[in-house]
Amino acid sequence: MPYRFALLLVSAATLAYQIALMRVFSITGWHHFAYMVISIALLGFGASGTFISIMRRRLLERFPAAFATASAAFALSISLCFWLAQRIPFDPFLIVWDTRQYFYLGGYYAVLFIPFFCAATAIGLLLIHEAREAPRVYFFNLLGSGLGSLVLVAFLFWMPAEQTITLVYVLAATAVLLVLASLRRLAGFVVVVLLVALFYLQLFSSFLAPRISQYKGLRVNLSLPGAEIIARDSSPLGRIDVLRSPAFHYAPGLSFATRPTPPEQLGLFVDAELAGAITRFRGAASDVAFLDGTSSALPFHVLRADAGSKRVLIVGAGGGADLLLALYHNAERVEALELDPRIVRLVRDTFADFTGSLYRHPRVSLHIREARGFFEALPAQERYDVIQISLLDSFAASSAGVHALNESYLYTVEAFARFFDHLRPRGLLAVTRWVKSPPRDNIKVFATAVAALEARGIREPAAHLAMVRSWATATTLIKRSPLTPEEIAALQRFAEERLFDLVYYPGIRPEETNRHTVLAHDLYAEAARAILAGGETRESFFRDYSFNVRPARDDQPYFHHFFRWRALPQLLATMGRQWVPFIEWGYIVLAATLVQALVFSVVLILVPLLFIRGNGGAGLAARDKPSPYPSISAARVFLFFFGIGLGYLFVEMVLIQKLTFFLANPIYAVAVVLTGILVFSGLGSLAAARLGPRWLPRAAMLVAALAVLAAFVLPRLLPLWVGLPDAARVLIALALMGPLAFFMGMPFALALQRLEAARPELLPWAWGVNGCASVLATILATLAAMAAGFRVVLLSAAALYLLAAFSLSGRPALRS
């Protein structure tokens, strides 16, 4: 039993370590490179299978010492390898210019590979050693993984991401102490001394201090005169830094014709990237008059043509710039949505004097909610004059394509349609994005708006749309009713006074566009005309444009995915000479990770076959009774364990993404969904211990059937209940995922039992195959979802489980 509790702690520490590294690397660099490093590091699970296959006899003969050694090596390497990784001068921003960065990246792989390899070796050894009890052992593995994710997310609310590495270390060290207590060997005393010394080193030094890239916004702005960090906070949503410098000013896309200058401002950074500013406000309109020189002010000037009250909703309150803009234009009521409560506390409480108590203003009301969930739960009678969505990511992160792998339910056709439903008859939805070259974001916003209007039965969407472009930002307007001549005149005056370029309005003439910030080729205006033309003209534009600007939908909510393979020659041709290669790095890195992981996986799967001979030989492989199962070929074993390795992660990733939308909070989604899936799977594995290997094909087929059901039922059911209270939605999420996750926990454990009886020498190889498949699954599932949607990923998972069911469907032989 000590070994099983140790397994629980090692499993918890392994998953917690993965989440902690992803958080830290998102702060120090960019999260898509963190994704790449972690994916390769997780090949340690595949490598452990190779290692155990080669050393199987020796390891199992000395199981207690081998398990203790692997666990101790895991514990000791957690913080040491993290410290080493921070010392490697890898900077992803330089990778296209400096060839040494590839060597440094290889160093990341080598260093981070070690703890995952050690953890997987400990887990694999116990599963193989107790293969006859595999369902019960696997229960501890899954339960530990589920609890590890929950504990790590909880602790991220209380401590910085890098300090959670110490928490992971404590979990792993406790597992080692449990094992050493049962061994009572002198070597164990030495290990304990090392563990304690390393703990104190982490506790009382800057041993785990992260090294932030010199090209991230925080490092750049810290070089300003007098710059200092005056506030810092951390949570699972990211690390927040507030920077003060007399030289810091933030007014994105501010018109060159604007005379008022920004007052004193504080820089607001999330994960070391600029996320806006907190502006000094003393209550006078003149304090914030400069905001009227940005393209985000457009809807308020168009709205002036309409008499009546102005009820404004700001999506993404941040430091409060859009709220100040609405108050500057005398909005009678301003509501604001902000997902991160820490930003609210900073502006409302910590810097209340600086902001003039903006968040406590009598005309301002604040909702700490995720935007899409807020709108899905909003009563139909709630309507607004302006819904403002402005610059929710930094220019650097957006330009580099680091959000390409992130789903966003805010910029889908279904989302725009919901926003449209909550506009008053003459209300405006205003969406502001950064201007990029070549254009991408704003063209995709325009296309999404057209699709949403058409989805709501608007036959002439051209009459409801307008777009204005500054030198750095562009704002798209979607109006519930057709734009009037008075509103168009207001729009023209707004653009002319600020030297902004008109891109589109109903009846615009070609000579009115591209007059101030002159582009060699006005792709914005061309795109607007092609999209509004509809039919084959629109399809030809989408098909031939260098970037993916088709509207995103809830089943494929990857608005930031712009990369198309036709653009790759251009990127490669300019690599190392221009800034262009940074466009859409996220997708390129994901594809490169898949190729690397595939190459490593093939090696790790094929090498053990050279060392596997016969049915395991004498000694450990001997059985008191002949196996009741026929022998199984390595090919069938591969199909099964590779199939469920892919299938399990496919289902897990889709459930997380779909329930993120339902729970309306990414933190709830990670904590509830990931923990729920793993714990329910663990319970399924425990139940499988009573059912026996005969249930193996049935369990796999049940998973396939439930995955198909989920693919078609979840998209219909979730919107019906999204307006319920948080607690009710959490219970519904658990109830919906429970049956599927429960049966997902059975096939792997039952197959280990089946394999132990028929081909025990293939057990470590099967463990390695499953580990390699799991790494590939995280990448393949993301690529498949981006290309075809979540439903296709779930249906693919069902097909994989059916393949697994038939690959190991042999029945026990009849006994006399």
Image: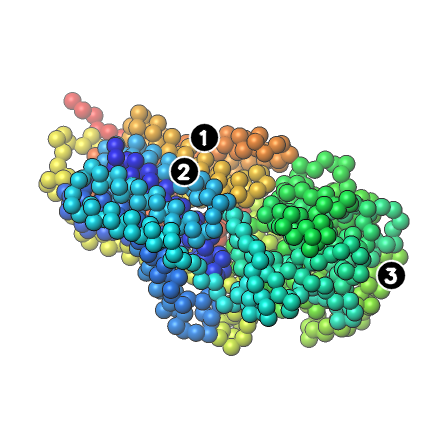
Residue neighbourhood size for the residue with mark 2, other residues' Cα within 10 Å, grouped as few (<14), some (14–19), many (≥20): many
Residue 147, which numbered label? 2
Please tell me whether residue 197 is drawn above or below residue 540 in the rendered image: above
Mark 1 vs mark 2: in front: 2
| The furthest residue to the left | 618
Mark 2 residue element = helix
Q: Coloured how?
A: rainbow
Q: Earlier in the sequence, mark 1 or mark 2?
A: 2
Q: Position of residue 236 (x, y in %)?
A: 51, 47
Q: Which residue is painted at 58% across and 66% down in the image?
A: 227
Q: Earlier in the sequence, mark 1 or mark 3?
A: 3
Residue that mark 1 sits on? 739
At label 1, the amino acid type is Pro
At label 3, the amino acid type is Ala
Please tell me whether residue 138 is drawn above or below residue 360 in the rendered image: above
Residue neighbourhood size for the residue with mark 1, other residues' Cα within 10 Å, grouped as few (<14), some (14–19), many (≥20): some
Residue that mark 3 sits on? 489
Q: Which residue is painted at 34% across and 54% down in the image?
A: 201
